[in-house]
Image: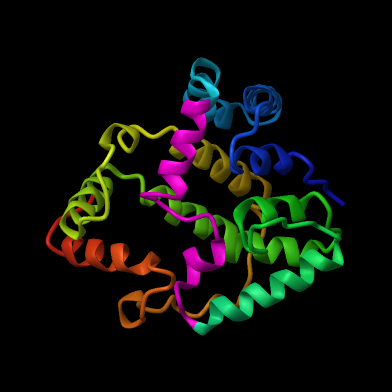
Amino acid sequence: MKKYNHYIAFADLLRYPSSDYPEKANKCMAMLKERYPEAALEIEPFVNYMLSHTEDEREELYTKTFDVQPICYLDLGYVIFGEDYKRGAFLLHMQEEQLKEANDCGTDLSDNISNMLTLYTKSDNRALLDELSVKILIPGVEKMISEFKQARVDLKIKVLKKLHKAIIQEDLNHGNVYKNILAALLFVLQKDFENVSFSSVLDPVVDIQHHNTFFGKQTLNIEVNKLASNYKLD
C-alpha cells in the first residue's frame, strides 16, 4: 500500500507556527523538490517568507489569515458543507476515524485540515483515504485557494469595514503566501489521487445564505457573496 507520510509536512505548516517553523518549511521544500518539483516551485514564496521573517511576524500572518480577519477557514467540513447538518454528520464520522487511529486532534476539530492530513500518515484504510481525497480534501483546498483571489479579498476588506469589525491590516491580506502552500498541497493531492474516481458524488453543497451564522463565521461570507454577485471575480 502506498504510504502518505509526506502529508505530515503540510500538516505541520498549516498549524499555528512553532519556534521550529522555518526548519519544517525547509524540510517540506526539500521533500517537494525530490518528489514533486512543480509543487516545490509553488511553495517557494511561502518558504522564503518564513525564513526571512521573525517568529512574531510569522505568528501574526497566521492569525490574520485564519483567525482574526480570516481569509478562509481550516475546518474542511465547514468549508465544504457550511452550516448544513451534513457538516455535523461528517464531523462525527471524522471523530470516529481519528479515534480509531489514536490521532490526538488537540484543541482543533477532527475535520481541521492538519488533523485530516495527519490521519493520512496513520490510516491503512485506502478506501477511506481515497474517498476523503476526491470528495473533501481536493475540493476543500480548491475552495480555500479561491478565497485568496484578490477581488475576493478586496470584497472581504470592504465588508469588514462596513461591519465595523476591526481596523483592517490590508498589507497582510495582499499577496498572502499561505495561498502558495495551499496550491502546493493541492498539486500533491491531485498527483497522488489522480487515478481515483467514485461513481457517487457528494450532494450539492447547500446554499449557506439560507442558514444562521455559525459562531459568526457566515456573516462575512454572506455579505461577500451578495457583493460578489455584482462583480466578476476572475
Residue 79 lies left or right of residue 226; in this view the side is: right
Instruction: Tell me where residue 65 sits by quadrant.
Output: top left
- Give the vertical position of 167 relative to 17 (above or below): below
Q: 201 and 153: which one is in front?
A: 153
Q: Residue at x 78, y 64 (%)?
A: 98
Specify the segment rendered in magenta: 56-84
Number of numbered labels in the structure image: 0
The residue located at (68%, 77%) in the rendering is 92
- Residue 20 visible, this orientation: yes
Q: Residue, x 44% and y 75% (percent of image)?
A: 205
Q: Nearer the viewer, residue 87 or 58?
A: 58
Q: Residue furthest left?
A: 230
Image location of residue 232, percent across then percent down: 17, 54
Q: Position of residue 72 (x, y in %)?
A: 42, 53
* 59 with respect to 188 (left or right): left
Residue 157 is one of the magenta-drawn residues: no
What percent of the width, then of the height, locates residue 141? 51, 52
In the image shown, does 197 or 230 lie closer to the viewer?
230
